[in-house]
Amino acid sequence: MALSPTVPAVAAGLIGGYGVARFTKRRELGGVVLAAAGAYCAKEWSAKGPAVTAGLLATYVGAFGLSHPLAKKLGAWPSVFTVTAAATAATAAATR
């Protein structure tokens, strides 16, 4: 079965959002990347029903939130990669 296009979009939103914020030193620009990817994913997930959409959106936003305290223990980039791996795995499993 083909991988949902939302799987790389989740990765792009989380990794790209952090990368943009870090390298431009403009957190709001990173937020735009994060929100744009999240909006695209939510639109695509809506075809799977409201429960799947809500669960995956909560996972996406939760991964973003969890990366902040996790960064204190792992470092910034390792934290982002860790939460991205978890979020993309959940997305792949839920969108099969």
Image (cartoon, grey):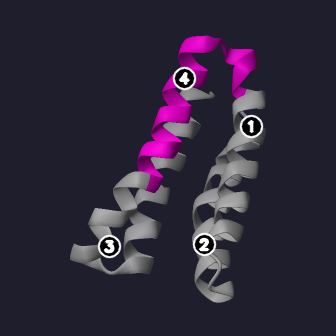
- Reading the chain from its start, which is encountered first: label 1 or label 4? 1
- Reading the chain from its start, which is encountered first: label 1 or label 2? 1
Residue 15's spot in the image, x, y percent? 59, 67
**Looking at numbered disc 1 in the image, what kind of residue is underneath it?**
Ala
- The residue singled out by tag 4 in the image is 54
Q: Which of marks 1 and 4 is in front?
A: 4
Q: Image check: 28 left or right of 91?
A: right
- The residue singled out by tag 2 in the image is 27
> Is 51 located above or below residue 17 in the figure?
above
- Reading the chain from its start, which is encountered first: label 1 or label 3? 1
- Reading the chain from its start, which is encountered first: label 3 or label 2? 2
> At 48% from the left edge and 47% from the top edge, which residue is drawn?
87
The CA span between labels 1 and 2 is 34 Å
Q: Do the residues labelled 1 and 3 touch (CB within 8 Å)?
A: no
Quarter holding the C terminus is top right
In what element is the residue under mark 3?
helix
- The residue singled out by tag 3 in the image is 71
Residue 24's spot in the image, x, y percent? 69, 86
Q: Nearer the viewer, mark 3 or mark 2?
A: 2
Residue 65's spot in the image, x, y percent? 40, 53
Q: Image check: 8 left or right of 57?
A: right
The CA span between labels 1 and 3 is 33 Å
> At 66% from the left edge and 67% from the top edge, which residue is drawn?
28
Q: Image check: 75 left or right of 29?
A: left
In what element is the residue under mark 1?
loop
Residue range highlighted in magenta: 45-64
Magenta stretch prevailing secondary structure: helix
- The residue singled out by tag 1 in the image is 2
Crowding at label 3, few (<14), some or many (≥20) Cα neighbours within 10 Å? some
